Image: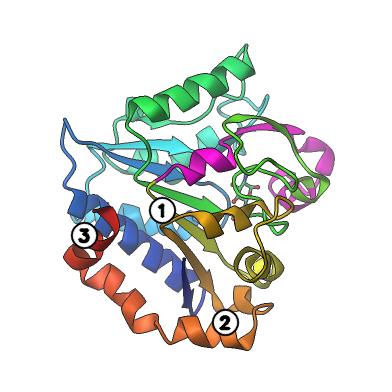
Amino acid sequence: MRLIILEDADVVADWAARFVMQRVTQFAPGPQRRFVLGLPTGGTPLGMYRKLIQFYKEGKISFKYVTTFNMDEYVGLPRDHPESYHYYMWNEFFKHVDIDPAQAHVLDGNAPDLVAECARFERLIQDAGGVHLFIGGIGPDGHIAFNEPGSSLVSRTRVKTLAYDTLEANKRFFGNDISKVPRQALTVGVGTVMDAKEVMILITGGHKALALAKAVEEGVNHMWTVSAFQQHAQTLFVCDESATLELRVKTVKYFKALSSEHQKMIEDAPVAAQRVLH
Ligand SMILES: N[C@@H]1[C@@H](O)[C@H](O)[C@@H](COP(=O)(O)O)O[C@@H]1O
């Protein structure tokens, strides 16, 4: 595991976007060789999407041969509801870049058969050859995607009933009215994300500090589902200073001492890419 500690949320956004750009461009995707990217929603990755759009406009990256799979979607929200993840992805990212909309997969929370929809999504990921880089965010209770505390750490894409903490955390998007937050969601499983070749989890803000400490310093525990990534061969946690507040000083010092190595991962792309992908 790598823990990359950066100054603030803006630097996290910039670092994450540069990392995605390096991975995609070094892979050199083409019609017969698509790069497969897993994507999150939420407030945390917004800055990364903005940077990626900027890099696209500057001609530094293309998404033409990139296939994407989103982590999750609410059940029962119309696709064009401003809080649906379809709406978010289209408005915050897809419509600004050259991605083929047919290759940008988001779970359908309005499918007549939700179980079949989840199975279809897993099959699509398999047919695409698996995910090269899965980017994730977490909730303050340490959930990844919508894998709430107590979720199986080998779970696959499925329907989940949301925890009260998640409804609380997300009500800000629904006029602060908890009764408006959908009670269920479709989500990739922890196992689905674990199957990706590489995982990058973005964590910013003091309200995520306990979750980061549980993820990094304590054992693998299904009550903090993000802790499962201790057992992934290529995980990066990218966080800001505020998110480190519950970590031991020793942990922070150790990873900060590696910061020049971490910087090379976005500057010295050919070497970094070879190390991780081969
Ligand atoms: N299902 C999503 C998660 O995938 C996301 O990581 C989390 C954090 O969101 P934010 O980045 O807004 O804190 O929110 C929701 O619960």
- Horizontal placement of 99 versus 109: left or right? left
**256 versus 37 height, above or below:** below
Disc 1 residue type (three-letter): Tyr
Q: Is mark 1 on a helix, strand or loop?
A: helix
Disc 2 residue type (three-letter): Thr
**186 versus 36 height, above or below:** above
Ligand 1 lies under 8 Å from the Cβ of mark 2: no
Residue 93 can be seen in this image: yes
**260 versus 218 height, above or below:** below
The crowd level at tag 2 (other Cα within 10 Å; few <14, some 14-19, many 20+) is some
Does label 2 or label 3 sit earlier along the sequence?
2
Ligand 1 lies under 8 Å from the Cβ of mark 1: no
Using the image, tell me which numbered label, if any, was put on residue 49: 1
**275 versus 70 height, above or below:** below
Does label 1 or label 2 sit earlier along the sequence?
1
User: Which portion, as a residue range, is magenta?
Assistant: 168-196
